[in-house]
Image (cartoon, coloured by chain):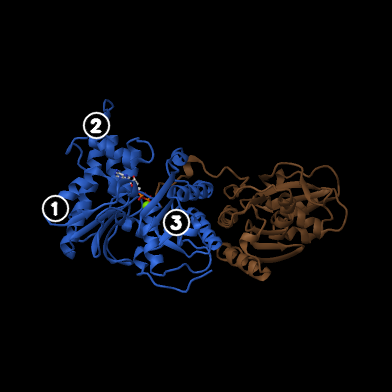
Amino acid sequence: MRLLALDTSTEACSAALSVGDAVLERSVEAPQGHAGLILSMVEALLAEAGVALSALDGIAFGRGPGSFTGVRLAASVTQGLAFGAGLGVVPVSSLRAVAWQAIGVSAAAHDGVLVCNDARMQQVYWCAYRPGVDGLPIALMEEAVGAPESVLRPAGNAWLGAGRGFRAHPALANLVPGTPTDAFDLLPQARAVLALARPDVAAGRLLPPSEALPIYVRDEVAKPSSARPSSS
Amino acid sequence: MRILALESSCDESAVAVLDDGRGLLSHVLHSQVDLHQAYGGVVPELASRDHVQRLLPLVERALAEAGTCADELDGVAYTAGPGLIGALLAGAALARSLGFAWGLPTLGVHHLEGHLLAPLLEPDPPTFPHLALLVSGGHTMLIEARGLGDYTLLGDTRDDAAGEAFDKSAKLLGLPYPGGPHLARLAERGRAGRVVLPRPMLERPGLEFSFSGLKTAVLHAVRALPASAGEAERADIARGLQDAVVDTLIAKAVRAIDATGLDALVVSGGVSANHSLRERLGSAARERGVRVYYPRPEFCTDNAAMIAVAGLARLAAGERDAPGIRARAQWPLVSLRPPAAMGADA
Ligand SMILES: Nc1ncnc2c1ncn2[C@@H]1O[C@H](COP(=O)(O)OP(=O)(O)OP(=O)(O)O)[C@@H](O)[C@H]1O
Ligand SMILES: [Mg+2]
C-alpha cells in the first residue's frame, strides 16, 4: 500500500510515506513555519521513495483537534494534493494518533490510554481509548475540549496518560499513575496517522478530496462582540 | 496561456479561469455575508473555516464551467496578501498544493494589484501610464501606475478607508450588514444639502484623505434626529455622507490629474461600484479630457477574475513563487516590482 500522511496539528510538523511495509518519514518540532515546510517534506519523501504522487493509494491527514491554523494547513494541502493527483483522502484524529503512539511507548499491559493534548487557553483536547484487537486504539467517548479539571478517567487503574496536556497541567498525571513520563511528550505524528488510515484505505473507505476538512472540537470561537469591522 | 486563480483574502471565496487568448472562461464566488451578519463584521476565524470548505468545490465548478481541465492549465495564481492571514493561508495552501500535484508554476498575487488591474477585463481596457483611484473596504489610495508593478503612491488615507466610512455610517443608521451598498441605495432617496457633513481634507493641499471624522458627524446627525423622524430624514443623512465622501474623492482625484498630467484614470475597489461617484467623477474627468475606466460592478468588490489578471501577467513574464506556502497579512503595494523571471521552484 502506498500511502502519504501529513500532520501539522501541533508544534510537530510531519509527513510519512509508506511503500509496502517500509515507512519513510520527516518530522520536526517547531512552534511555527509548518506552512513553509510541509510541501518540501512531501516532495523529499516522494523523491526518496521514487514514487509519483499520482501512484499513491490515498492521502491521510491529521484532521485535529489542534491548532486551528495547523489543522487547516493539513486539510488544505491534502485537498490540493489529492484533487490534483486524483486520490481519495482519510481524515485521522490527532488525539487518536497520540493514543497509537503511546501504545508503542509502553510495553506494559493497561486498560487504555487517556490522551490530553494541550489546547492552550488553560484547556486540553482529550479523549479516552482502549486498545482494539488489532492493537489500534478505539475511542470510548466523543472528543472533548475543556479545563484540566473536566478530564475524567474511565474505570480501571492501569491507565496510560499521553500527550502534552500532561506537561502543561501536571496535576493531570494523578489520573494516570505509573505512566512513563515519555508519553507526556508525545505530539501527533504523521507515521501514526498513516498507521491508523491503513485499514480504511485497505477497505476502500476513502473520501473525496473536498471532504478533507478539519475537526476543531473547540467550536465556540466568536461572540457577537468579538467581531471586527469588515476590511481585509 | 491559461491559469486558475483563487481569492480568499477576506470574506469572499472565489475562483476563476483566465486565458490570454480567449479571455475570462469562468468565475465563481461564494460570499460569507450571511455567516458574518450576526457579528456585524467579519470574524477572522469563521472566515478561515469557511474558506477551507468552499474553495475546492469552487475550483471544481470553475474548471467545469470553463470546460477545461488541469492538462490545459499553465499555472495557478492566488491572493497572497494583504488580508486576514488565516483566510489567505487557506487559498495559498490549496493553490500551492494543486500546483505541486499538477506540476504547474504558482504565484502569490497582491490583492490590491488585482483590484488595480480589474478594468483590464473589460473591452477597451486602459493602458499604462495612468492614474488609479483605489477605493475599497480597507484602502483609499491615489496611485500613479506607470506599468505592471511600477506604482507610486500619491495619496493615502490617514485613518478610515472610504468603504469603511460607508460601512460604519450604515451601521449607525441601523442598516443591515454589510452597509455600504445599503447606504448608497438609501442616499439615492436623500435630499442634497439637508445634512452637510465636514470635508476636512478639502481645505488642505496634498492628496491625503481622512474619513474617520465622518462617522462621528453621522453619529451626531443620527442623535439629533427628532423622535418623529422617518425614512426620509435618515435618507438625508445617508445622502450627506455619500456626498461628503464622493466630493472628497473627486477633489483629490482632480488634484492628482492636474499634478501628474495623466489623461487616464482607473477607479477600482468596492466603492467604485457607487453610482454617484461614477456619475460625478465622469463629468469632472470629461471636462479635463480624461478617460475613466472602471471594472464591471461585480469585479469592483473582491473576486478571483482580477487575481487571475494580475497572476497571468506575472506568470507569463516568468515570475514564480519561492518555495513554501506563504501569505502576508501586511504587504505594502509600493513594495511591488515589475515581474521578475525567477528560478522555477518545485
Ligand atoms: N455601491 C457602493 N457604494 C459605496 N460603497 C460600496 C458600494 N458597494 C460596495 N461598497 C463598499 O466596498 C467595500 C468592499 O470592497 P472590497 O471588497 O474591494 O473591499 P475589501 O476587499 O474589504 O478591502 P480591500 O480590498 O481594501 O482589502 C465595502 O466597504 C463596501 O461597503
Ligand atoms: Mg478587496
Q: Are marks 3 and 2 on the same chain?
A: yes
The verdict on label 1 being within 8 Å of ligand 1 is no
**Callout 1: 10 Å neighbours few (<14), some, many (20+)?**
few
* Farthest residue, direction right: A109
Any mark on residue B4, and which? Answer: 3
Residue that badge 1 annotates? B286
Chain whose colour in the figure is brown: A
Q: Are marks 1 and 3 on the same chain?
A: yes
Which tag, 3 or 2, sits closer to the chain's start? Answer: 3
- Which quadrant of the rendered structure holds the C terminus of chain B? bottom right
Question: Residue B27: x, y in percent?
Answer: 40, 49
Callout 1: chain: B
Q: Is residue A35 left or right of residue B211?
A: right
Q: Is the residue marked 3 within 8 Å of ligand 2, measured from its CB? A: no
User: Which three-letter amino acid code belongs to the residue tagged 1?
Assistant: Arg
Q: Nearer the viewer, residue A227 or B300?
A: B300
**Which residue type does callout 2 highlight?**
Glu
Q: CA distance from mark 1 to mark 3?
A: 37 Å
Q: Chain of mark 2?
A: B
Position of residue A160 in the picture relative to residue B301 (left or right)? right
**At label 3, which amino acid type do we have?**
Leu
Q: Secondary structure at mark 2?
A: helix
In this view, the residue farthest toward the bottom is: B343
Label for residue B233?
2
Residue B76 place in picture, x, y as percent: 46, 60
Q: Colour of chain B?
A: blue
Let me know if residue B106 appears in the view: yes
